[in-house]
Amino acid sequence: MLSDSEISRQSPRRPITEVAQSLGLTPHEYHTLGDAKAKVQLQVLPRLAAASCGKFIVVTAVNPTPHGEGKTVTSIGLTQALHALNKKVCACLRQPSMGPVFGVKGGAAGGGYAQVVPMEELNLHLTGDIHAVSSAHNLASAALDARLHHETRLGAAAFAQQSGLTPLNIDPERLLWPRVMDHNDRALRQITVGQGSNNGPEHSASFVITAASELMAVLALSRDLADMRRRIGQLLLAFDKDGQAVTAERLGVAGAMTAIMRQAIEPTLMQTLNGAPCLIHAGPFANIAHGNSSIIADEIALKLADYVVTEGGFGSDMGFEKFCNIKVRASGHAPDCAVLVVTLRALKSHAPTPPQDISAVDFTALQQGFANLAWHLNNVRRYGVPVVVAINRFPQDTEQELTWLQQAAINAGAADCVVSEAFSHGAQGALALAQAVLQALQQPADFHPLYHPEAGLQTSLATLAELGYGAAGVSLSDKAQQQLQQLQQLGADKLPVCMAKTPMSISHDPALKGVPRGFVLPINELRLNAGAGFVTALAGNVMTMPGLGLNPGYLHIDIDAEGNICGL
Amino acid sequence: MLSDSEISRQSPRRPITEVAQSLGLTPHEYHTLGDAKAKVQLQVLPRLAAASCGKFIVVTAVNPTPHGEGKTVTSIGLTQALHALNKKVCACLRQPSMGPVFGVKGGAAGGGYAQVVPMEELNLHLTGDIHAVSSAHNLASAALDARLHHETRLGAAAFAQQSGLTPLNIDPERLLWPRVMDHNDRALRQITVGQGSNNGPEHSASFVITAASELMAVLALSRDLADMRRRIGQLLLAFDKDGQAVTAERLGVAGAMTAIMRQAIEPTLMQTLNGAPCLIHAGPFANIAHGNSSIIADEIALKLADYVVTEGGFGSDMGFEKFCNIKVRASGHAPDCAVLVVTLRALKSHAPTPPQDISAVDFTALQQGFANLAWHLNNVRRYGVPVVVAINRFPQDTEQELTWLQQAAINAGAADCVVSEAFSHGAQGALALAQAVLQALQQPADFHPLYHPEAGLQTSLATLAELGYGAAGVSLSDKAQQQLQQLQQLGADKLPVCMAKTPMSISHDPALKGVPRGFVLPINELRLNAGAGFVTALAGNVMTMPGLGLNPGYLHIDIDAEGNICGL
C-alpha cells in the first residue's frame, strides 16, 4: 500500500472553490489560499442565522492505547461514505499540533484512504492559526513581564509619571500566565526567566504546548469575533498585590491579541480524499484542554450541511464528555448520534493481563477487554445519545472475533455495530458505517448533560468523578481546597469543569485498565480559565508540555528531490 | 490626514492576479492567498535563468535617529513613482517583525501614501514565513535538548541500544543554538531551562528575536530549496565532547526543519498603494543579522522587471555594507545605484550638540550634522555605486534649508539630491526622485566589495573597521581571540563578517554622533554561522532580543466594531 503522503499527493483534488460551492458558500463568503484551502469569512454567520441545522454526529472511542485506534480515520471515512451516498455532509476537525507531528505520532490527518488533503499542509502550518494563537499568547506573557519589570525598576509613582499609565502593582508571586510553543520541548517545562541585569525580576516560569493553552480553548469556544474579544479581555494573567485580578483587558493587551488572531477565527475549508468538505478549526488537546474543534466551524457546517461529522479527542471519558458538558453548553448544538471507535487490539490491551501479541486471536483477552467498550457505550448513552460502534478493522482481525464483538456490542446497547475499513478502502470501506449511522439518526436523541455547573464546582466535580468515571469519590488536595475557596470568592465556581487527566484509563491512573472501580479521584489543582469559561481540574500528574522521545518523528521527515515533503 | 491603516483600507487594490500578470508571472507560477497576496513558486527560477537582469537600486540612509528617517517610505514611494512613469518596476522588501510592531515603532509597511497594502496583513502574519522560521528554529532547540536529555539519562551505551541511534555525546557546556520568538520579550534574554525532575540537564539558555536568528539569514541568503536544505544541514548547534561540530544534519533535524520552511522559501507578492508589484521575503534585522530581504525575491524581480528597488536596514554602515559584502557575494547581483535617505531633523540630531527642537530652523546644527551625510555618501561611493540623496521632507522643513542641503550633497559627490514627499503625496511626491534615479542609472556603476573574505577573518575585520567605519583599528577580546583560533582550526575564517553593532553611530558606540574618529572597534565575540555562511562579530553591547518599553505599541491596537484591525 502507498504511504499516506503518496496517497494524498496522487489523489485528484477538486478545486476548493467547487468544494465551497457544493457546501453552499457564496464566493464572497470565503477566500481561497491556493487551490486546496479557503478561509471561511464570518459574515456567513448572520446570513445563516435562521437556517435549520443538520444532524450532528460525534465520533469518540474507547480508552486509547499507544497503538492508535483510528478515530480520525473513522471520522473522515464516515464523511467520505456519506458523501459517496450523495448526502450533504461536512466534517469539522481540529488542526493538528506540530508537537505530535514531529514527536511520536506522525500526521493527524487521518491515514490511508481516509484523509483530509493535502495532508502535508494540514499537518504543518495549514493557514497559520496555531501560530497566531502562540503569538497572541506570548505577547501577553511578554507584556506582563515587561510591565512587572518597569514598575519594579521605577517604583509605582515614577512609573505612573513616566508612562502616563496607572500602575498595576502585579504580585510577582502570583503570575499565572505561561508561555506557549507548538513543539514537544521538555526543557521548557520548568524554567527561570528574567535573569541577568535589567531583564528581571527573575522568577520561575513555564511553557505549555499551544494546544494545551487557554487561548486555544478560547478560539475553539468563541461564537464570533466580538465574543472572542470579550473572552480574551477576561483572561486572568496574574493577581495584583491587593489580590485583584490582572486580566488581559487591564494590562491593555487584549485588543492586540485579538488583532493577532483576527484571521485565525475563520475556519479553514479543505476536503477529504473524495472531495467532501471539511472545516479545520482550532486544536485543543483533550487531556488538558477541552479537546474539540471550534464552535464557529460547527455552526457554519450545521447550517449548510445535512450531516456534520466531528470528533472529541481520546475516549468518551475525555473529549466526548467535554463536548457534552463544555462545548454544547457554549454552542447550543447537542449531538444527534455518536460513533464509538474500537479495535480488537485495543480491547485486548484492556484485559487485566494483556496478551504479548495483541494482534493474535485471543478470545479471553477480547472478552475481558470488552468491559472497557461496554463502559464507554453506557457512558455515551447516559447523555441520551444513540451509539453506533465502529470496529476499525486491522489486517490480522478474524471474522470470528469481529462477529462476536458485533453481537456483544449490540447486546450491550449499541444501536448497531459495524466493521469499518476506511483506512484500506476509503468511502467504500465505511459505507456500512454510514448506513448504520443514518439508521441510528432515525432514533430520537434525548440529550442531557451530566451535570449542571450552577450547582457549584464541588458538586460538579463529584458528579463528574462518580457518574462520569465511576469513581468512589473525589478528594481535593490542600492547594485545590484553597483554590476552590478563592474561586468561590471570585464568584467563579459556577463554571463547567475541564478535567485534565490521563486518557489511557477511565480513571486518573494510566495503570488502571478496563473498568476501574473504587478509586478516589485526586484533584491536585484547580485553575480558573476565565476566558475559556471553565475551571481546569488537574487529576494526577498531567503533562502540559510533551517531550520528544528516543526515536522522534522528525528524524524521518525531509524534502525529496522534487521538493515534496516526505516522511510525514 | 488619514491614518496609515485608513489609507491602506480605503485605497482600491488591483486583484493580485493582475499584479502577477503585469510582473510577467504565468498563472502556474504563483498561487493566490486571498485577493491581496500570492506566493511565487520557485519553478519560475529555471524559466528565467537565461533572462537579462533589470537595474538594481538599493535604498540606504544616514545613521538613524529615534524619530525615523522614512527609508521604507522612500523605497515604496520610489517604486510607486517609477510605476507611475510606466516603468516596469518591482520592490523587494523584508517582512516586518511583530516585535517592533507591538513594541515601539508601529508598522513597517511604509506609511502615509507610500505603503505596501494591505498594511495590516504585511505587519502581522503575512503568509506565515516568520512563524515558519521560528518553528523550524525551535524544533532544532527542542531536538538538541531532548537528545542531550536522553543520552545523559541513559548513558551512551543504553541510549544506542534503546534508540538504535549513534550517541552524539553533546557537550552540555558548549550548546550554541538559542531559541527564538518573534516578540520583544526581555525576560527571555537570559534564562535557565531543564529544571525539575526528568526535564534536564538544567542549563543556561536564551531566546533571541526571530529576525536576529541565523535561520532567518539562511532563508534570506538561500538560492533555492536545495541550497536552503544544504545550509540548514550545516547549522552549528553545539560541540560534542571531542570538540566536533554537532550540526543540524548530524542531529537528524535538518530535513524536518526544511519541511517546516518549505512554503516560507516562496516570496510573497503584494502591491504598493498604486498597484506596483512588491515581493516581500525574509526579515533579518540589520544590527545583528545581515539586514536585507531575500536573494530569491531579488532574482525573480531582476529577471522580470526593468527596475528593482530594495533597501538595506539602518544606515549605509549597516544594511548597505552587508548588502555589498554578504548578499552580493551570495547572489551575484551588484547594485547599479543607491538612494541615500536623509531628513533635516536627522542631520540636526547628528550635530555635536543637537538643538532642543530639531524641527526648528537651525543652520548651524544642519551644517554640523551634514558631516554624517557626507560620510555615508562617500561610504556608498567607495563601493563604486552612484548615489542619489533623497531628502524625506517633513512639514516644518523650510525651502531655504532644503536648498542648502541639496547643493551641499551635490558638492559632496551625490549624483543628485532631491526632495521626496512620498509620505504625503505618494507617487507624485517621489517623481523627482524617480527621475534622478533614472538619470543616475545612466552612469556606469563599477561595483567592488570592501574586502575579500579569502584574506582571512582578521584582515576582513580590520578592513571593515578602518575603511568601513573609519576606526583607528580593531581590538579583539580574549574570548574573541580564542574564537578566532577555533575558526581558523575549523577552516571557517574565510567567511564574510556580519557585524553586530549599534545602528545609531558609525562606530560601535551610540553616543558617538556625526563622524567619529580615532576610536578602536572592540570585538567581544565571534560566532560562526555556518549555515548563513558568515561570522557574526559582536562589537559593543548588542541586544539580540529587544524589550517592550514604557508605552508599548500594543496598547493602541484593537479591532473596531466592523472587525477591522485599528491602531497599527
Image: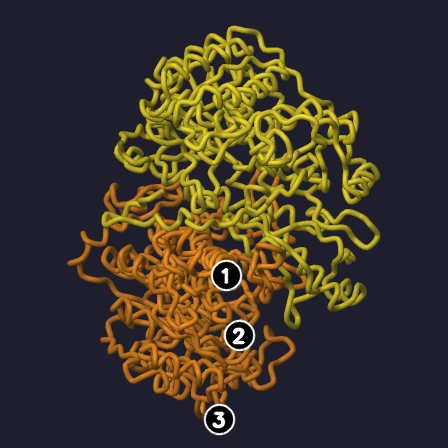
Chain colours: A orange, B yellow
Q: Position of residue B62 (x, y in %)?
A: 53, 25
The local secondary structure at tag 3 comes to loop
The lab-note entry on whether marks 1 and 2 share a chain reads: yes
Which label was assigned to residue A325? none
What residue is shown at x 45% (from left), y 74% (from top)?
Answer: A315
Q: Residue B23, can we see it? A: no
The kind of secondary structure element at disc 1 is helix
Q: Could you give the CA–CA distance between mark 1 and mark 2, rounded to whole angstroms?
A: 34 Å
Picture coordinates of residue A183 (x, y %)?
55, 58
The foreground one among A118 and B86 is B86
- Seen at 34% across and 16% down, the residue is B84
**Which amino acid type is shown beneath numbered disc 2?**
Val
Chain-order first, disc 3 or disc 2: 3
| Residue at which label 3 appears | A518
Q: Looking at the rendering, which quadrant does residue A293 occupy? A: bottom left
Residue depicted at 43% across the width and 64% down the height: A284
> Alpha-carbon neighbours of circle 2 within 10 Å: few (<14), some, or many (≥20)?
some
Q: Secondary structure at mark 2?
A: loop
Q: Nearer the viewer, mark 3 or mark 1?
A: 1
Q: Crowding at label 3, few (<14), some or many (≥20) Cα neighbours within 10 Å?
A: few
Residue labelled with disc 2: A542
**Badge 3 and badge 1 both on one subunit:** yes
Residue type, label 3? Gly
Q: Nearer the viewer, residue B41 or A147?
A: A147
Mark 1 lies on residue: A152
Q: Does mark 2 fall on the same chain as mark 3? A: yes
- Residues under numbered marks 3 and 2 in contact, where contact means CB atoms less than 8 Å apart: no
- Tell me residue B555's x, y (percent): 37, 51
Point out the image quarter for the N terminus of chain B.
Answer: top left
Q: Between label 3 and label 2, give the one nearer the viewer.
A: 2
